[in-house]
Image (tube, coloured by chain):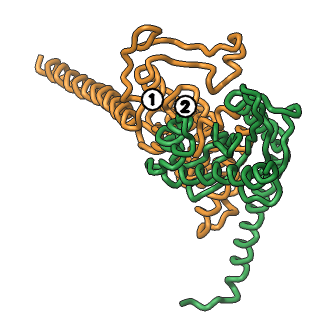
Amino acid sequence: MNKLQRSDVPTILKTTLTLTVIASVAALLIAGADLLTRDRIAANTLEKEMSILHEYFGEPEYDGKSFDIEGDDHLSKYYVVRLDNDELSYVYRADGRNGFGEISLLAGIKEDAIIYSVRVIENGQSYGSTLEDNYLKPLYESNDKEDALNHVECSATSGAKLVRKLVLAAKEHYQKHFMEEAA
Amino acid sequence: MKSKKLTIFTNAITSENALFVSLLGLCPALAVTKSIESAFGMGVLFTFVLLGSNILVSSLRKLIPDAVRIPCYIVIIATFVTLVKMLANAFLPELYSSLGVFLSLLVVNCVILGRAEAFASKNGVVDSLLDALGNGVGFTLAIVLIALIREGLGAGCITFGKTFTFIAAWNNGKEIVIPLLKGPTWDYSLFVLINPAGGFIVLGLILAVLAAIKNSKENKKKVDAKLKKLIAQGGQAK
């Protein structure tokens, strides 16, 4: 192994400086783009969420205002939604990540902790289309969501398990906070 | 000099097309060619990343140490991919959703890294810009052609306005649907072409057609050369 010579130091310094400058410029460009697009992306995400909420869950109460959830790994907020039969339900926004990517979804829970609707907002899984075709579509079409959630063996099992975990987290929160309070 | 610069641009589209000649960038070419809009969107974003990375790599080619050039190229390409992702998410959210993980995969796209290493690191900024533009246009045309066949014959109709919603907005909120093999009461679409296997089949067929055209041109040249020789020999004999 060659020993480090005094003459190597300028080369090493030049390499280090070049790499530092490239990384710094890259970081600045990305930070600038983030500043430019952050609000727009947040607005787009909210618009998509509200559109899915209206279409698949029902009309939200309190003028569409959401209620934040603190201290949960997956649940960030919930909406109060009135169903067709005048029953109140709670629609949770859940976000999770596994080795294959991120998933964000809305899960609707109604009286007696029944899961009445699930919709994925963002499917960032590598096997996203497989997850969509083999697990999510049957889940959307099923009348018994809790049973359909358990059919995770679908060639995108990791993603399916993540979806199940997020929906059950929503159900658990409902049971803990709304069923116990009512009791 | 002018023709050399034009040659760099045109060669990248035709005789050195990244997809049809070098068979590079197959991943996005097969994954996002289920619809023309997604393919066109991917092509435009791909061109933007390639332009940015080629220009920057060419500008810094004398500063980047040889031993760490590949990691430097990856950092530069990843920066532009991140910028493109953020901009697409903000201003073209439907395109961003339809491209999914394949937009992020541009970081390791063979064409982008290959052009940085093979051309931009060895040539000036203007030449690198032309090379990037040519490769971007060539790649976009190639994947749009594949998408045209897959969507037209596989889905049975070509739809505009689903990903680029401004087209639907321009058409009173309705998507523009051009029926080809599928109509309101009939369906002769070749569904296999929409599947992943169909992507390979379409690509194979296009490559076969291009090879046939190239072979016939080469055969014609050989036949013309032989005829000229025979005519010359016949003239000498007289």
Which chain is mark 2 on? B
Disc 2 marks a residue whose amino acid type is Ala
Q: Earlier in the sequence, mark 2 or mark 1?
A: 2
* Amino acid found under the numbered disc labelled 1: Ile
Chain B drawing hue: orange
Q: Residue furthest front?
A: A183
Residue A99, horizontal then vertical, whole percent: 57, 59
Q: Can residue B134 be seen from the camera position used here?
A: no
At horizontal 64% and vertical 89% (from top left) the residue drawn is A4
Q: Is residue A130 above or below residue B184?
A: below
Image quadrant where residue A108 sits: top right
Q: Nearer the viewer, residue A54 or B187?
A: A54
Q: Which mark is residue B178?
A: none
Structural distance between the alpha carbons of marks 2 and 1: 9 Å
> Pointer 1: residues within 10 angstroms few (<14), some, or many (20+)?
many
- Disc 2 crowd rating (10 Å Cα; few below 14, some 14-19, many 20+) is many
Name the foreground residue: B98 vs A156. Answer: A156
Q: Which residue position holds label 1?
A: B146
Residue in the foreground of this view, choosing between A77 and A112: A112
Judged from the image, the secondary structure of the residue bearing numbered disc 2 is helix
Q: Is residue B205 above or below residue A99?
A: above
Q: Which chain is green?
A: A
In the rendered image, residues at marks 2 and 1 fall on the same chain: yes
Q: Mark 1: which secondary structure?
A: helix
Q: Which mark is residue B39?
A: 2
Q: Is residue B36 left or right of residue B210?
A: right
Tally the numbered discs: 2
Q: Residue at x 58, y 62 (%)?
A: B70
Decide: marks 2, 1 in contact (CB < 8 A)? yes
